[in-house]
């Protein structure tokens, strides 16, 4: 009897420390305790038929963690949670690292090459990227064709920067859609461990029907990927090199809880890679105002980076309207970096709850016809200035 109950206790402990295949371990807020184990069906149900996040669908899951339900109820854009399943150790925000960094004062005189690069921004090249990515029925990270758009992004980077500059960062066995990382090496080898990151997500989602619905995701987030490829095209053609490396990252599985970027951030953290700053573009092409709107989303600190972002916009993107908003927790992939203590910011067309937000995102109507690619060029200017000012 004694022996049997010890075995039972041991089995119970073993079960408790393993997350079952259909359960995901998620972080839904910044506090250390904002972590819950949630069925994957509940996470997918949030992308339900009524509104961007159909919270009523969670009624079918009566045992859900109350803090998780409350956080999802108050959340507007993006998944609202980070999927930590399989990531070890479970990360917590590190305020110290985020606030420690200092950034340069933008100086256009010191970077005369930027003005030349700005003249090379091509609306037709941006349009072509969006058209191609939107032509996949869906880029959902669990669709049977989830790998194909990632490989297209990979091949596009290879043609612009050469195959030795581009890697696939696999997310298997969790799901079969890799992240794509293009690296422009820096000239100072003692800074090779301190990359500057610019990212966007390559997956898309149809909120009514994630696994089979059409999800062009032209704005969300083919627009962000188009900026990355345009930066690669211009800097690659110029043969530009900074002293620090630049890494252009196309993340997989953002809509599933920032899965791809969480895997990269965990890996970089465990390798001691000292990412200096990460910039995220998620939905930048829906621009109905007279001037392009560039919204700096900064509700979780990183104040030095947010101040730098504004000064960069003032110096290099004078045609834009600067706007600040907050996103709530886990709005986009910059949160994966933030979660490991890296300084990260997202600059987008809008916040989650204002009139600039694209009303068609996560639907079959998130198409190029709703966007203004001319105004997207302002985000390419921001990305080029970000790369050159931080890496030269
Ligand atoms: C900007 O850069 C130029 C050229 O390097 C330099 O002469 C000037 O002093 C810099 N301005 C500031 C405010 O640092
Ligand atoms: C390379 O970076 C290191 C570390 O910041 C710096 O001390 C060194 O002066 C740099 N070398 C060159 C050639 O700029
Ligand atoms: C990262 O972006 C999110 C929006 O996606 C924003 O809420 C958050 O404040 C950003 N993080 C930092 C450190 O600015
Ligand atoms: C969204 O905006 C409306 C109108 O400004 C406001 O009443 C509401 O509280 C906002 N909701 C959130 C979650 O910020
Ligand atoms: C797109 O923006 C440009 C630049 O502001 C403007 O000239 C053009 O009319 C806009 N296109 C549409 C369809 O609104
Ligand atoms: Zn989205």
Image (tube, rainbow, N blue to C red):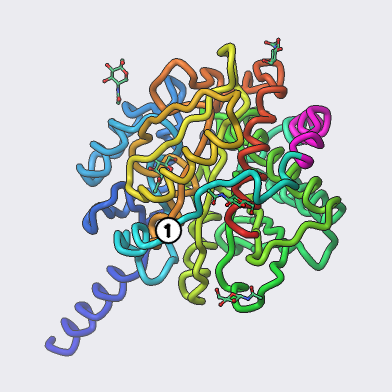
The structure residue drawn at horizontal position 41% and vertical position 59%, both measured from the top left corner, is: 84
Q: Is 256 situated left or right of 298 in this image?
A: right
Q: Give the magenta range.
A: 116-131
Name the image quarter holding residue 210. Answer: top right
Give the class, few, some or many, for how many residues have Cα within 10 Å of label 1's Cα (few <14, many ≥20).
few
Name the image quarter holding residue 75. Answer: top left
Taking the image in four quarters, ligand 4 sits in the one at top left
* Image spot of residue 371 (x, y percent): 66, 19
319 falls in the magenta region: no
Helix, strand or loop for the magenta stretch, by majority: helix
Q: Secondary structure at mark 1?
A: loop
Query: Eyeballing the image, is 62 above or below 190?
Result: above
Identify which residue, 80 or 14, lies in the foreground.
Answer: 80
In the rendered view of the protein, which quadrant contains the N terminus?
A: bottom left
In the rendered view of the protein, which quadrant contains the C terminus?
A: bottom right
Where does label 1 land, which residue? 102
* Image spot of residue 314 (x, y percent): 52, 33
Q: Is 71 situated left or right of 201 in this image?
A: left
All told, the count of numbered labels is 1
* Image spot of residue 135 (x, y percent): 77, 31
Q: Residue furthest left?
A: 2
Identify which residue, 354 or 262, lies in the foreground.
Answer: 354
The structure residue drawn at horizontal position 50% and vertical position 62%, both measured from the top left corner, is: 276
The structure residue drawn at horizontal position 49% and vertical position 19%, both measured from the top left corner, is: 356
Identify which residue, 306 or 11, lies in the foreground.
Answer: 306
Query: Eyeballing the image, is 211 above or below 372?
Result: below
């Amino acid at each position: 009897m004694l022996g049997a109950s010890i075995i039972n206790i041991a089995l119970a402990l073993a079960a408790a420390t393993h997350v079952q295949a259909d359960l995901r371990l998620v972080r839904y807020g910044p506090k250390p305790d904002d972590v819950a184990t949630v069925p994957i069906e509940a996470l997918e149900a949030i992308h339900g038929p009524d509104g961007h996040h159909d919270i009523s669908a969670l009624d079918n899951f009566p045992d859900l963690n109350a803090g998780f339900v409350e956080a999802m109820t108050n959340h507007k854009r993006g998944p609202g949670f980070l999927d930590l399943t399989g990531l070890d150790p479970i990360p917590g925000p590190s305020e110290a690292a985020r606030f420690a960094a200092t950034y340069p004062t933008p100086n256009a005189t010191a970077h005369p090459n930027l003005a030349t690069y700005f003249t090379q921004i091509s609306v037709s090249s941006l349009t072509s990227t969006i058209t191609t990515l939107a032509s996949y029925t869906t880029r959902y990270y669990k669709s049977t064709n989830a790998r194909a758009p990632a490989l297209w992004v990979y091949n596009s980077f290879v043609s612009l920067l050469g195959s030795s500059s581009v890697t696939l960062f696999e997310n298997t066995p969790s799901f079969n859609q890799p992240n794509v990382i293009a690296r422009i090496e820096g000239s100072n080898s003692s800074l090779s461990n301190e990359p500057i990151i610019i990212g966007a997500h390559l997956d898309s989602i149809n909120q009514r029907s994630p696994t089979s619905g059409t999800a062009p995701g032209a704005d969300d987030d083919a627009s962000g990927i188009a900026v990355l490829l345009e930066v690669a095209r211009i800097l690659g053609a110029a043969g530009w090199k900074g002293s620090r490396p630049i890494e252009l990252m196309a993340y997989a599985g953002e809509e599933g809880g920032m899965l791809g970027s969480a895997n990269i951030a965990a890996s970089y953290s465990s390798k001691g890679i000292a990412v200096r700053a990460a910039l995220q573009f998620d939905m930048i092409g829906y621009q109905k105002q007279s001037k392009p709107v560039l919204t700096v989303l900064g509700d979780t600190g990183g104040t030095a980076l947010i101040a730098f972002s504004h000064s960069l916009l003032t110096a290099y993107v004078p045609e834009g309207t600067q706007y600040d908003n907050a996103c709530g927790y886990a709005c986009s992939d910059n949160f994966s970096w933030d979660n490991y203590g890296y300084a990260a910011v997202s600059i987008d067309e809008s916040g989650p709850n204002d009139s600039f937000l694209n009303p068609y995102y996560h639907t079959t109507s998130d198409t190029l016809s709703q966007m203004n690619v001319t105004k997207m060029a302002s985000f390419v200017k921001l990305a080029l200035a970000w790369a050159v000012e931080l890496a030269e």
